[in-house]
Image (cartoon, coloured by chain):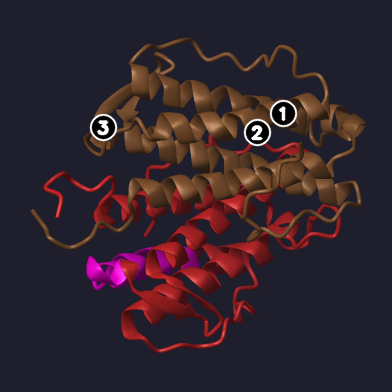
Chain colours: A red, B brown
Amino acid sequence: MSTVKPIITPEELLKHWQGHRALTRRVIEAFTEKDLFEFSIGGMRPFSTLAKELLAIAVPGLKEIVTGETSPFDEEGAGLETKAAILEAWDQSTVQIDDYWAQISLEKFRETNNLFGQYNFPVIDNILYFIDNEIHHRGQGYVYLRALGIEPPYFWEREKVAVEG
Amino acid sequence: MSTVKPIITPEELLKHWQGHRALTRRVIEAFTEKDLFEFSIGGMRPFSTLAKELLAIAVPGLKEIVTGETSPFDEEGAGLETKAAILEAWDQSTVQIDDYWAQISLEKFRETNNLFGQYNFPVIDNILYFIDNEIHHRGQGYVYLRALGIEPPYFWEREKVAVEG
C-alpha cells in the first residue's frame, strides 16, 4: 500500500459537507416565511420542500450506513411547517451527522450500501450524492432569492452559523 | 500509515467530475441558441456566461496546478459566441482535463496552490471548488430550463455523451 496521505480524509470530507450545510442554512434563513413555503419558478418545489428533502437524506442516510438498517425514503417532513422548525431540525441534524460520521470506519466508505433500499452504491458515492444534491438544490434556491430581489449569501461562506440559545 | 484504502482515489474523483461535466454538457445542449445567450432570471447571468466561467476555471486551473504557472482568471471566453463553439470548447476541455489530471501526483493534492494568484488553498480544495461551483451554477441552469418550459436532464445522468464526428 501507498505511504502517501490520501487526497482527502473522512474528517476533511465531513468538514466540507458541514461547511456546505452551514451555507444552505443561510439560504433557508434568507427567505421570508411565506416565500420559503410558497415561492417557486417553473413549477419547481418551494425551497422549504427542498430543505425537507435534504433533511430526509442526510441523517437517515448516514444512520442506514452506520446501522445497516434500511428504511424507505420519507421526505414528508411532518412537523416542519415553519422556518423556525426547519432551522431547528437543520441544527439537530448537524449534531447527528457529526455523531454518525464518527461511527463510519475507513473501510466502510468503500463498501456498498443499498441506500433507502433503492440505490446500491459504495458508501463514498452515497455521501458524494448527499453533498452534490444539496449544492444542486441550493443553486435553485439562489435563483429563487434573486428572483425575489434578495441577495443570497456568498457561495464561499462556509463557516458554521452560531446557533442561538 | 494506514494500510486501508483511501475513501476516494484520484481516478475516482476524476470520473466523478467528468460525470458532472457530462451532465452540464447536456444542460448546455438543452437550451435554444437564443436562450443560452439571453435568458436570465433576477438579473443573473445567462447560462452561456456561466458555462464560459466553468471553462475558464477547469483547464486553466488544472494547468496552473500542474505547471505552477499562475495566470489571472479570465472568463471572457473570446470566440465562444455560439452554442456549437461552447460545446466544442467543452469537449476539448474534457480531453485536456484527463491529460492534466494524469500529471497530478498523489502528494500534490495536499500541497497548496494559489489559484489564479488569489485563492491559496490545498489543491484538493481547489478541485472540490471546481466541482461544487459547477454543480451550483448548473442548478441555476435547471431553473432557467424549467422557467422556459424545458425538461432538464436527470440529475443522476452522468455517463459521457458520445461526441459526434
- The answer to whether residue B45 is seen in the rendering is no
Please tell me which residue lies in front, A136 or B109: B109
What is the CA distance from the residue labelled 1 to the residue labelled 3? 30 Å
Q: Is residue B73 above or below residue A140?
A: above
Q: Of label 1 and label 3, which has the lower sequence position? A: 1
Report the magenta residues as a range: A89-109
**Looking at the picture, how far across and down is residue B98, in whole percent?**
48, 36
- Pointer 3: what residue? B108
Disc 3 chain ID: B
| Residue at mark 2 to residue at mark 3: CA–CA distance | 26 Å
Task: Report crowding for label 1: few under 14, some 14 to 19, many 20 or more residues within 10 A (C-alpha).
Answer: some
Name the residue beneath numbered marker 1: B88
The total number of labels drawn is: 3
Tell me where residue B124 sits by quadrant: top left
Q: Nearer the viewer, residue A130 or A94?
A: A130
Q: What type is the residue that disc 3 sits on?
A: Lys
Q: Residue at x 46, y 67 (%)?
A: A126
Select label 2 or label 3 by which is in front: 2
Task: Please state the chain letter of the residue tagged with numbered disc 1 in the rendered image.
Answer: B
Residue A29: mark: none
Q: Position of residue A77 (x, y in %)?
A: 60, 77
Tell me the tag on residue B91: 2
- Mark 2 surroundings: few (<14), some (14-19) or many (≥20) residues within 10 A: some
Tell me: A83 left or right of B66: right
Question: Which of marks 3 and 2 precedes in the sequence?
Answer: 2
| CB contact under 8 Å: marks 1 and 3 | no
